[in-house]
Image: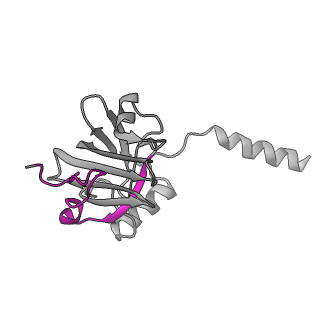
């Protein structure tokens, strides 16, 4: 009977909403302390500029913060299985408004350390890929915060994705 009572008490706690980032919960205070000491990146202060990567996936961002920036992405699984895209990104908090052309637009997420594309993208984004490759659910971590390195990322046709287009 005690086991049943304990289980009911645990289940009762499941209905409570998760603490918000602005709450004064122990977790929120711990995260604020870690950010203050530089142990965790503060997403509000983190820059997008640089090179982002995971395995063979690459993403670059260049340009001044606070406005529209250049973005490029490369997914390369070899033998005709690749994606290459260049366009713009505009940051609004943790949301990134990505545009790889008129018809390939979507919102990605940024947490200060990682950029994640949504699992479902507009069908028009498929035109940027060959074979079975896709930009869907592309998730990359910061590799470098160097704008000059980001400007050298090249697409499948050897074109600069984040460099000066002129």
Q: Is residue 124 above or below residue 67?
A: above
Q: Magenta stretch: residue 47 in it?
A: no
Residue, x 22% and y 65% (percent of image)? 149
Q: Which residues are magenta?
A: 138-165
Q: Is residue 5 above or below residue 27?
A: above
Q: Which sits in the foreground, 154 or 72?
A: 154
- Count every numbered label the image shows and give the total: 0
Q: Is residue 41 left or right of residue 134?
A: left
Q: Which sits in the foreground, 93 or 124?
A: 124
Q: Which sits in the foreground, 163 or 139?
A: 163
Q: Is residue 156 above or below residue 103?
A: below
| Outermost residue to the front | 79
Residue, x 35% and y 37% (percent of image)? 107
| Image spot of residue 153 (x, y percent) | 26, 58
| Image spot of residue 151 (x, y percent) | 19, 59
Name the chief secondary structure element in magenta: loop
Residue, x 12% and y 49% (percent of image)? 165
In the rendered image, which quarter is residue 125 located in?
top left
Q: Which sits in the foreground, 119 or 23?
A: 119
In the rendered image, which quarter is residue 55 located in?
bottom left
Q: Is residue 42 left or right of residue 11?
A: left
Q: Is residue 98 left or right of residue 147?
A: right
| Outermost residue to the right | 1
Q: Is residue 37 above or below residue 161?
A: below
| Image spot of residue 104 (x, y percent) | 31, 33
| Image spot of residue 76 (x, y percent) | 41, 53
Residue, x 25% and y 34% (percent of image)? 101
Colour treatment of the image = one colour
């Amino acid at each position: 009977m005690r086991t049943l009572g304990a289980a009911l008490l645990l289940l009762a706690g499941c209905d409570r909403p998760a603490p918000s980032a602005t709450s004064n919960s122990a977790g929120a205070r711990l995260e604020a302390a870690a950010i203050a000491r530089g142990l965790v990146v503060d997403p509000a202060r983190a820059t997008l500029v640089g090179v982002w990567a995971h395995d063979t996936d690459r993403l670059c961002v260049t340009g001044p913060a606070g406005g529209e920036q250049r973005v490029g992405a490369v997914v390369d699984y070899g033998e005709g299985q690749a994606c290459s895209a260049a366009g713009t990104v505009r940051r609004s908090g943790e949301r990134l408004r990505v545009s790889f052309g008129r018809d390939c637009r979507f919102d990605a997420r940024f947490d200060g350390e990682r950029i994640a594309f949504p699992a479902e993208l507009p069908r028009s984004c498929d035109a940027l890929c060959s074979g079975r490759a896709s930009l869907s659910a592309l998730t990359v971590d910061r590799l470098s915060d160097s704008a000059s390195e980001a400007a050298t990322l090249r697409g499948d046709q050897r074109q600069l994705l984040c460099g000066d287009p002129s």
